[in-house]
Amino acid sequence: MKDANTKVVYCGIDVSKTSFDGYCQGRSFKFKNEYQGYRKLIDMVKDKAVHYVMEATGPYYLSLAVYLYQQGFKVSVINPLVIKRFSQMRMIRAKTDKADAKLITLYAEKEVLKLWSPPNPILHEIAQLQATIDLLGKQDRMLKNQLESVLVQPFQSKKVINTLRFFIKKLDDKIQQLEQGLLQKAEQHFNKQLALITSIPGIGIKTGITLLVITNGFTKFDSSKQLASYTGICPRIYQSGTSVKGKGHITKMGNNRLRSMLYVASWSAVQYNKACHDMYHRLIQNGKAKKLALIAVANKLVKQAFAIVTNQEFYNETKYYSKYSLLKSKHPVLHVYENR
């Protein structure tokens, strides 16, 4: 809890696509989510010491947050789930943009806030490339499935087949171009960090890039535990007293993309990463399910990645299997630093 004597002006803001609602100094207001609205906000509050607080509502909050940060104001961006739980604890039922802004201000006055800073522009661009590649990949799979269903039918339309093949070829080419551009940009700006991350047996270049994006170059989180929690691979214990002892599960409230990639990476880590190999087989021998053991391996990979990048030390391959050399040969980005 905060010191009651601390005098800080908090301004809670609820941002939507076209507008944002705010509550500050006992007043509610609403402006358009654009530059003119940002200027009106500053002119209305007229307090350079104000601390602006908002939820991370998709991409809509980012322009306002960046603008306020560039103007020298303190900015905090809160996970919407945190605000939801805060509301539930106080049994607040009202759900409007105006009420949400007031609730965010109340949260800011009660809790200790972490200051926000804008994401690395290059990492933000890489994230946009990843999202576009994922979207095009889904469309590509849909068209290929449709083509397959047409080809197995006894009566076929050549126009349909040719159209589907045309768009599949276009999508495949565009996806390949975007993936090459993403890799080049990542290696150009984050070659050393990628080399560090991908020196870990089990973590490939795509997972390494995603880790960089999610963590904003490993500056967004203070510990591997925070990163694991954000990813959604932390165990959640379900136990109360002596009678309630449910099975533990991962939270699954984190980043789906990174969680899925780490789970796939855990398959390779079990073979090539000795620490992960030993952990996996120890858990299996203790009667744990294979899926649970793989999740534990994914958590271990997060800890290794955080430690290696934080300490700026390459993975110590002398402690692990000689099979690591087979894995390293798959990642050309490593060769820039492998002799150092």
Image (cartoon, helix red, strand yellow):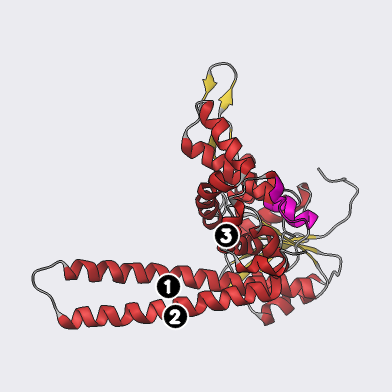
Return the disc, 2 or 3, that comes first in the chain's sequence. Answer: 2
Highlighted magenta segment, given as a residue range? 305-318
Q: Nearer the viewer, residue 114 or 200?
A: 200
Q: Which residue is mark 1?
A: 136
Return the disc, 3 or 1, that comes first in the chain's sequence. Answer: 1
Instruction: State whether residue 198 appears in this view.
Output: yes
Answer left or right for 271 relative to 155: right
Residue 127 position in % (x across, y down): 59, 69
Quarter of the picture holding the C terminus: bottom right
Return the disc, 2 or 1, that comes first in the chain's sequence. Answer: 1
Q: Secondary structure at mark 3?
A: loop
Answer left or right for 32 relative to 149: right
Instruction: State whether residue 119 appears in this view.
Output: no
Tell me which residue sits at (76%, 47%) in the image. 111
Residue 155 position in % (x across, y down): 9, 73
Q: Quadrant of residue 9?
A: bottom right
Q: Secondary structure at mark 1?
A: helix
Q: Are marks 2 and 3 in contact (CB under 8 Å)?
A: no
Residue 103 position in % (x across, y down): 66, 53
Vertical side of 224 occupied by 62: above or below: below
Point out which mark residue 332 bears.
none
Quarter of the picture holding the N terminus: top right
Q: CA distance from mark 3 to mark 1?
A: 22 Å
Q: CA distance from mark 2 to mark 1?
A: 8 Å
Q: Are marks 2 and 1 in contact (CB under 8 Å)?
A: yes
Q: Nearer the viewer, mark 2 or mark 3?
A: 3
Q: Which residue is mark 3?
A: 204
Q: Which residue is mark 2?
A: 174
Residue type beneath disc 3: Gly
Q: Nearer the viewer, mark 3 or mark 1?
A: 3
